[in-house]
Image (cartoon, helix red, strand yellow):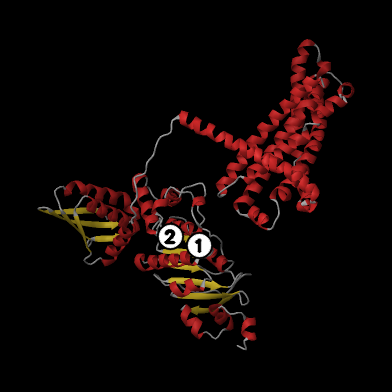
Amino acid sequence: MLMEHVTFQVERGTIFTILGGSGCGKSSLLRYLIGLEQPLAGRIDIDGVGEPHRYEGVPPFGVLFQSGALFSSMTLAENLKLPLTKWTPIRGAIARELVQAKLDLVGLGPFADHLPGEISGGMKKRSGIARALMLEPDLLFFDEPSAGLDPISAVELDQLILTLSRDLGITIVIVTHELASIFLVANHCIVLDKATRGIVAQGNPSELRDASEIPFVHNFFTRSSPAASTKSGG
Amino acid sequence: MSVAVRVDREGDHASLVPAGPFDLSHTTAVARAVDGTVTRLSGCVSVDVDLAELDRIDGAGAALLARFLDQLDAEGRRACVVEGRNPEAARLIALYREHRADRPPSQTHPISPLARIGALAARLPGKANEALDFTGRCAVALPKTAAHPSSVDWRSLPKLMQEIGADALPVTSAANLLVGIIIGFLGVSQLGRFGAVAYVPELVVVAHFRELGPLVTAIVVAGRSGAGLASEIATMKVSEEIDALRSMGLDPLRWLIVPRCLALVLTVPLLTWVGDVLALVGGLGATAALTHMTTRAYIQATLNAITVEHFLAGLVKTPFLGLAIGLIACGQGLLARGGAAAVGVRTTTAVVLAIFSVIVMSALFTFFFALMGI
């Protein structure tokens, strides 16, 4: 069993992060939340959707996978057009206009006819975000959005996340362990621990960093290892 | 609720009032309503867009309104957004206007069939160069392998031989058995017209041992193992595993391709030999089913027809056919660039090239043997 007694609530319009060390089940939890897998027990309830793994219909949320997960045989425009084609009757010039608007929003307007293999990792992530936005969801899930990005690209991506939340009012759930991003964007977080197989802390990241008395949480937010703490007498 | 855009004109000033849900599910109606107002604005120099009666707006509606406002600006009209009781809508439209990039009109030039042929022909020397380059590098790898045996992943060889040889045995055997049956049926129907059914065993031996056995086996191996090798190497290429090997000082040609080619060189003759035996069984079955020739008579005629010459004329081709399959499959895999689509393209190309190559090589061997009188 990977985790148990994981209970939390995400408030509408916030940026919520799921944190934890490697192997604690962050990505598995995300897969449950987006309905790709079903937990052995318990319930996931997304407003207006019910249980995601049973839901059939227009996807109520968008997902950015860790590597972008763009289809390599399609251009960026074709990748973005796919959800429109599947779930709406929008075609032709209007579809192209909407696709272009989303690419412009993420700063990739000139790259509509490029293949994923022709753009950088950061650009793939932004393309993935644009595709996740195509059906105008109120909720977005991001899996390690900053993974593999240089610091500048990571900051640009964080700014984009803040824009989506502030200007579009989208609720965003992020799985990450990038501390810089967490402190910049997150309103609320939960911290998972492999040892306890559950949530060891929840709250505002800055408050947890400053006030948590749980060693694992303190070490996580201050980037210190237990051995280093012992060595320094801390 | 319906989508509409009301236009109130006062001289050269117009006030547009979009109403209803300007969202994704009403996009077509929104586009129609917005585009329909353009004709009603002729002569206007200033336009106000009042968002007070918008029922709902999302990114899709905001993008279309942003495009419309940009179009008004481009036509020299002063466009102003009146947010009124809808500041969120105004902010959303401003967000899409702010990010709208200047794009040059896309230029599509239709390419004539002659130009396409020319482009293909122009690429041929490059492709031939690539093939020769790869063959040369593989040839250079052989003496280096002899000098540094540890540069080859020998541990993978038994598993490769099992996958390419033992696991392929059922399908190559079935193919050769069926070909033997086909030759038997054909022989009985054609030679029977001349009362020469007694020569059917010799026909099966000569046709299968010399030509069809090696060819059918190689084609099946090319389709099965060639595709597997090409896709494996291509996937390693696109996921940077080949780069990782090189960064560790390992030559991918020696580490990966030498064991794979060696496995093919060793297993294709064995598969062909088993296939030859099963073809004889197939021929026997066909002949016994259609004629009064006894099994004993068929076997005796077969033994009389089998010569070392016939057997070796077929078998000697097989290591070369196996080598060709290995080089083509692995070579195509190493050319993969991009993602999953590239793996598919290279795998398909590898199989087509490998099958075509084994047919051409078989023909060349046959021509050579004919010249030599073998």
Q: Which mark is residue A203?
A: none
In the displayed orientation, state which residue is furthest to the top: B194
Give the quadrant of residue B190.
top right
Quarter holding the N terminus of chain B is: bottom left
Q: Is residue B2 visible?
A: no
The location of residue B133, given as percent across then percent down, is 65, 40
Q: Amino acid at mark 1?
A: Ile
Q: What residue does disc 1 label?
A: A34
In the displayed orientation, state which residue is furthest to the left: B11
Q: What residue does disc 2 label?
A: A60
Q: Is residue B222 above or below residue A44?
A: above
Quarter holding the C terminus of chain B is: top right
Tell me the SS state at disc 2. loop
Mark 2 to mark 1 CA distance (whole Å)? 10 Å
The location of residue A5, given as percent across then percent down, is 56, 75
Q: Nearer the viewer, residue B297 or A138?
A: A138
Lateral position of residue B5 relative to residue B371, left or right: left
Q: Is residue A129 visible?
A: yes
